[in-house]
Image: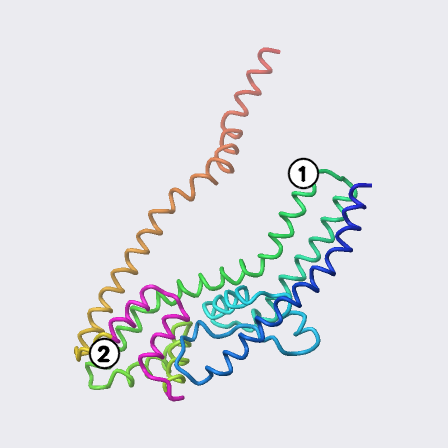
Amino acid sequence: MPALVWVAVAALVLPFAVLAQLTLTRAGKAGVVARQNLTRGLVTPAFEVGTLEARGTGAGAVLRALTPESAARRIRRMIDVAGRPASFTMTRVLWAKLGLAAATALVGGLVVVEAPGLPAGLAAVLAVLAAYHVPEAALWGRGQERQQVIARELPDVLDQMTIAVEAGLGFEAALSRAATTGRGALAEELVRTQHDIAAGRPRRAAYEALAARTRVPDLRRFVGAVNQADVYGIPLADVLRVQADEMRVRRRQRAEEQAMKVPVKVTFPLMVCILPALMIVVVGPAVLGLMESLG
């Protein structure tokens, strides 16, 4: 009976809570949309744009009403870091979060009704929270893998740009050549940067947007060095050579760090999986023979 009472109370309270959220957040989201429309066309960081709009009808309006602006901005940044994959659009991620949370809440409610109690209720709440954040975790993992790929590709791209600049090409021509001839995540980001520059965006702002999208420390350091060289008139060939050497050393250090972590990571599977089987194979016959002799 207490579980049924809690379900009835939730059925009565949740509609009023959703209505209150719609009423309180409508004005704030309308102000955000108005501010974006007024500042459209101005030079703003690319990673600050991309919130959900308050207007719309149908399922999109419901999704915008149920999603806070902070969560929308966070997911948009994660999508940018992941390279805007086709399977992880803003709408799909938000609907997946709500759908998984609702399905888990339904299953958890049935479990609580069958076995009422504080442990079951706490487990159901934790399961709902975990299911709500599962799409974000998958998107975050995709972004982490892409950041590692970009960090590995950066020294080779800088070497290619260094050779092109020393051969007589300009920095933008070398960057365009590396973007068109390269493959992978870094080449895609360079192509997008070239499109931003061709569309009329200042070169400095386009490079900063590149660093903000990828969120790779090495690439951010390279962008800062290029912008500083552009301001103070330092030859870009020297900057590229120094940055390529430094990135190559950092890549080697990361590889050595990962190699040093392997023995620690192997210890737990060795102790749990391999060592017990080895003990059974080695010591098992001796134990059986001793038991037969003691009869």
The colour scheme is rainbow
Classify residue 58 by image quadrant: bottom right
How many numbered badges does the structure rendering display?
Answer: 2
State the residue lying farthest toward the top: 294
Q: Position of residue 202 (x, y in %)?
A: 33, 84
Up-down relation of residue 256 to residue 201 (above or below)? above
Name the image quarter holding residue 222.
Answer: bottom left
Label 2 crowd (10 A; few <14 / some 14-19 / many >=20): some
Q: Find out whether the residues at labels 2 and 1 contact each other: C-beta distance under 8 Å.
A: no
Q: Is residue 71 left or right of residue 191?
A: right
Q: Is residue 8 left or right of residue 230?
A: right
- Camera-nearest label, 2 or 1: 1
Q: Is residue 160 left or right of residue 215?
A: left
Quickly name the residue at label 2: 163
Q: Callout 1: 10 Å neighbours few (<14), some, many (20+)? A: few
- Stretch of the chain drawn in magenta: 198-227
Residue occupying image coordinates x 24% and y 69%: 244
Q: Which residue is mark 1?
A: 119
Report the front residue among 64 and 111. Answer: 64
Three-letter residue code for mark 1: Pro
* Residue 209 falls within the magenta-colored stretch: yes
Q: What is the secondary structure assignment of the residue under circle 1?
A: helix
**Residue drawn 42% across the image and 77% down it:** 188
Image quarter where the N terminus lies is: top right
